[in-house]
Image (cartoon, grey):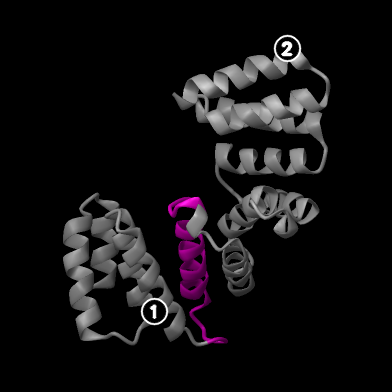
Amino acid sequence: LVTLCVYLGIAGDPETAHEVIQEAVRLDTGLPGVRAAEAQVLHHLGRHKAAVEAYRQAIKLDVPGSDVNHVAATTFLGLAKILWYFLPNDAIDEAEVIDLLERSIERDPGRFEAHQHLARVLSNARREDLRDPEKALQLARTALQAYSGNVDAYLLASLGMAQYRNGDFEDAIATVTKALEAKGDAQAPLKLFIAMAHWQLGNREESVANLAESMEQEN
């Protein structure tokens, strides 16, 4: 049932996937993988608070040291992403997000996703005491090395943000520009980072121009 649920989700039928996973939960509520799959479906349905609760149930069922590390790693990563990207800013516990991503990496060190998301959080945490630019840069580079696909805009953007936080402003501009090119369309937050980097380098005209583009894209 869980496998069917995954295929339905990939096929773009989250409503039916939800019905299937509810039956799987009814049959066995003690498998963390079932609860994690339920959380993924709820997330696709836009029910983020319910997804958070399902992920938390999966974590409670997790057995440290088990042979299904990929399930635990996916669970920690999935919960962290919802907390960081989909909840209101005032509802985010950034320390918890960092802990979840570190636990995901611990359970499955080879997955680039957790590395690059942790790099973003450590670069951009609203709580400055939680920022760790040097570690963020290392994580972003590790993610790029572990990624085997074509040029990925998101990974490049994460690297560029970490470079900016480390004061590598010229490298940050070059990397974020590559991210924009790989994406194929401009993104306001990335233009903002380019604007900030130019400002730090004393390039006032370039900074203002990129800031104006960023504000225009936001509207």
User: Which region of the structure is painted magenta?
Assistant: 64-89
User: Could you tell me how many numbered marks the image carries?
Assistant: 2
Give the amino acid type for the residue marked by disc 1 in the picture. Answer: Gln
- What residue is shown at x 80% (from left), y 52% (from top)? 134
For image coordinates 65% across by 26% down, the residue present is 177
Q: Residue 188 at x, y = what percent?
A: 54, 28
Q: Name the residue rendered at 65%, 48% in the picture.
A: 124
Magenta: main secondary structure: helix
x and y percentages locating residue 156 in the rendered image? 64, 39
Rendered view: 34 above or below 8 = below
Neighbor class of circle 1 (other Cα within 10 Å; few <14, some 14-19, many 20+) is some
In the image, taking residue 31 as reference, residue 172 lies left or right, namely: right
Marks 2 and 1, the one that precedes in the sequence? 1
Give how far apart the Cα atoms at labels 2 and 1 are: 52 Å
Check disc 1 and report the residue beneath it: 57
Residue 96 falls in image quadrant = bottom right
Residue 56: image x %, image y %? 42, 75
Q: Quadrant of residue 203?
A: top right
Q: Callout 1: helix, strand or loop? A: helix
Q: Which mark is residue 205?
A: 2
From the top left corner, tell me how far across and down residue 99 is, in percent.
62, 69
Q: Amino acid at mark 2?
A: Glu
